Image: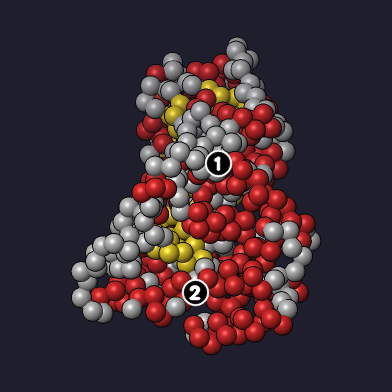
Amino acid sequence: MLIKTYGSAVQGIEATTITIEVNISGGTKYYIVGLPDNAVKESLRRIESALSASGFRMPRQKIVVNLAPADIRKEGSSYDLPIAVGILASSKQIGNVPLLTEFLMLGELSLDGSIQPVKGVLPIAVQAARDDFRGILLPSANAKEAAVVSQLQVYGVRHLKDVIDWVNGAAHPPQTYVNTQEEFQKNINNYDADFADVHGQEHIKRALEIAAAGGHNAILIGPPGSGKTMLAKRLPTILPPLTVQESLETTKIHSVAGKLTTASSLMTARPFRAPHHTISDVALVGGGVNPQPGEISLAHNGVLFLDELPEFKRSVLEVLRQPLESRHMTVSRARFTVDYPASFILVAAMNPCPCGFHNHPQKTCICSPGVVQKYLSRISGPLLDRIDLHVEVTPVDFNELVAATPSEKSAHIRNRVTTARTIQAKRFSSHPFIHCNAQMTPQHLRKICRIHESGRALLKTAMERLGLSARAYDRILRVSRTIADMEGSADIQTAHIAEAIQLRSLDRQSWSE
């Protein structure tokens, strides 16, 4: 008897509905066809044990399981549950077959019949709603994540017996509900860190506020202990709150990567990713034998922090160049091509030299001549060109460190950032893929970033003296536009351009001398 159940395959951060056809006929062997990987092929052994533990039998006949469409590779253990239910229905051990066509099922079976959580539930649920399924049956640990899609009836189950009782009409698992708006608003402002913890460093806070307001990349360069990492970790607290659409998109990526906790349904805080400098290029950009999002995609709509930037392998840093421009990552291999979004703010931190004390006001640098320049040359010019803000971090003065005057809270800074972003949102309302000044195209620069004659003269002088590239010129204009937005100015003033130029320390040749 031919029975059809439904599962799903995830490619990138999108899902495709998979029809699982089970046919039992005369014979003795089991077959799974339709490009299954080893985890799918091994499912029959798990299913046989789970059926036995649940009081049912594995038919001793020829079982053919087809996963259609057959040209899409099927990976992972989420097909265990729909295959098991298909085998039971095909062997007439359970009834109510029409119900199986209305629900999508997924879950990994343990040998005792319990159902284990799987990855990529949110994109699967989104696709199930698009394909007009009535609901989805899945592990209870994943139920809240799927219930974000309100069009679906979501039932979380813990054991294969629960599914069989549901199909037979003997029992009904409780439906899972999630109030998306309530869930979204509940933790939107919850952060463990705050800019109020940082004493002094007002010029660094100003630079990071500009970075947050315009979505600009930044590099912090200064001696050890000057607060680079502490400041970078607080950048997400001043970024505008995630929109519901951004939250869903971010959650999909983390769901596919298996990074969501079982208690969470939506990511409400902007991600902050800080990979170690020993990371490989594949781990950073994504890919692998079974393609997974990399750190740059996990930082989508948030912050990617690279501490000790010169210690990263040159090949790792160079793969960042294309995503920083295009804001997405295409992973192309012989057998697959997947696209991952990668719109993030890059914040890098580094010491000025190997000993860390070049240009320090009190301590003497012990590096030999030429070492500072060699150390800085570990970061290529093209990569530095793509970083808008080069900020020199100086040690905190003792009086500022012990000052009783409280520092400004992140919430106050965030209000100013949100106001600037609102101006940009109105400016780019007719361009769905541009959300902030850092994403402007050259065409927008010519229309939006018009400057007066005095500003043009200042910029020309800076270009000639600092030897800036055309890309650096564009970056300065973008930053100038952001500073003008923060001050509510319709035009870019000369002072805005001067501040933007000042925020490119590494372009000055005298810096490393």
Instruction: Answer with the quarter of the image where residue 436 lies.
Output: bottom right
- Badge 2: residue crowd in 10 Å (few <14, some 14–19, many ≥20): many
Q: Residue at x 61, y 17 (%)?
A: 174
Label 2–label 1 contact, CB within 8 A: no
Q: Residue at x 56, y 62 (%)?
A: 216
The front one of 132 and 319 is: 319
Residue at the extreme top: 170
Residue tagged by mark 2?
385
81 left or right of 179 in image: left
* Quarter of the image where the N terminus is located: top right
Instruction: Check residue 409 in the rendering and tell me which mark sits there, or answer none.
Output: 1
Inspect the image, locate mark 2, and give the three-letter code of the amino acid beneath it.
Asp
229 w.r.t. 124: above or below: below
The front one of 29 and 506 is: 506
Inspect the image, locate mark 1, and give the three-letter code of the amino acid beneath it.
Lys
Disc 2 to disc 1, how far (Cα)? 32 Å
Instruction: Answer with the quarter of the image where residue 248 lies.
Output: top right
